Structures are given as C-alpha cells and as structure tokens.
Amino acid sequence: MLRFKIFNSSNPMTDQERTGIIDFLHTHLDQFRDTKEAIGRAVAYAMNETPGPGGFVLQGKVDEDIVGVVVINKTGMEGYIPENILVYIAVDQKFRGKGYGKELMVKAIELAEGDVKLHVEHDNPARFLYEKLGFTNKYMEMRLTKNK
C-alpha cells in the first residue's frame, strides 16, 4: 500500500528530504527530465520559498522506498487559467505498471484546490493515464524562447 507524505509551507521538508526528492525526480523523469537546478526551483516555489502562491510536493512510499513524487505549483490565476499546474510526476522504474502513478495522480488532484493543468510530450506514455483521469487536450502549446 502506498503511503503519502505531503510537503508544503505548513509542512516543510528537511534538507535531506529535499535533496532526495530532487535527485529522485532527476533520475526517474528519464528522457523528460530537467536539470536539478530547475527541479529545485519548482520545489522551492511549491514550498512557498520564492515569490508566488506556492503549492505542494507529494511523495509516495512503499516501506522505505520512494515510489513516486509529484510537484504541483499554484498559478495564482483563478478564473481564467487553471489554479494549479502539475510540474513534475515521476515513478521509479521498478514500481511502474503497478498503479502507483495513478494513485499519486488521484491523490494530487484531490489535494489541489481548483483545476489542474499539465504539459505532456506527445510521445510520453503517461499521456494515456492523464486522459483516463479526465485531462483533455484543449490547446496547442506554443513557446518563444528569448536569447538571454
């Protein structure tokens, strides 16, 4: 059975937990991973350590093993953009295909106050789980990356 631990501004994580979560996400996001620095910024935002409305980090464990992690950031845009964005979800390869990803998603959706959006690559197999949970592809995303 999956045990959940919720981290947020009211229930902060230790430095060791933060490092473990960032390392876990960096490892288990596979080809969809971001840098540890980017993951750390999303975690800091969720923990309300940087300017913004915050969010939460959800960790799922079986015994002492981390099975999966979800990072949800609040958007602060209620009424015209979903109130939450699922920034990261990852499940350890050895625990995939056992329903843990779905359990994590269902719990994260339950905890999120308001609607939830996410970005998913077309070739990401998790896309099918999101569709089963009711997520729809309402828009095409376009980005402009400015040279810095």
Image (cartoon, helix red, strand yellow):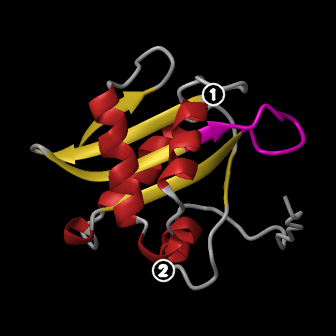
Residue 14 percent location from the top left of the image:
32, 24
Q: Is residue 2 visible?
A: no
Q: Residue at x 53, y 27 (%)?
A: 47
Q: How many marks?
A: 2
- Which percent across, then down, holds residue 36? 47, 53
**Main SS, magenta residues:** loop
Please tell me which residue lies in front, 76 or 99: 76
Res 130 → quadrant: bottom right
Q: Which residue is mark 1?
A: 54
Query: How far apart are the alpha carbons under marks 1 and 2?
Result: 28 Å
Region in magenta? 72-83
In magenta segment, residue 145 = no
First in residue order: circle 1 vs circle 2: 1
Query: Identity of the amino acid at label 1?
Result: Gly
Q: Secondary structure at mark 1?
A: loop
- The residue most toward the left is 63
**Residue 91 visible at all:** yes
Q: Nearer the viewer, residue 9 or 60?
A: 9
Circle nearer the viewer, 1 or 2: 1
Q: Position of residue 108 (x, y in %)?
A: 48, 43
Residue 73 within the magenta-colored segment of the rendering:
yes
Q: Is residue 144 left or right of residue 51?
A: right
Q: Which residue: 62% across, 39% down?
A: 73
80 sits left or right of 88 in the view: right
Labelled disc at residue 125: 2
Crowd rating for badge 2 (residues with CA inside 10 Å; few <14, some 14–19, many 20+): few
Q: Quadrant of residue 61?
A: top left
Q: At 85% across and 68% down in the image, what residue appears?
A: 143
Amino acid carrying label 2: it is Pro
When the figure is inspected, residue 73 is found, relative to residue 142, above or below; the finding is above
Kindly state the secondary structure of the residue where label 2 is placed. Answer: loop
Q: Quadrant of the C terminus?
A: bottom right
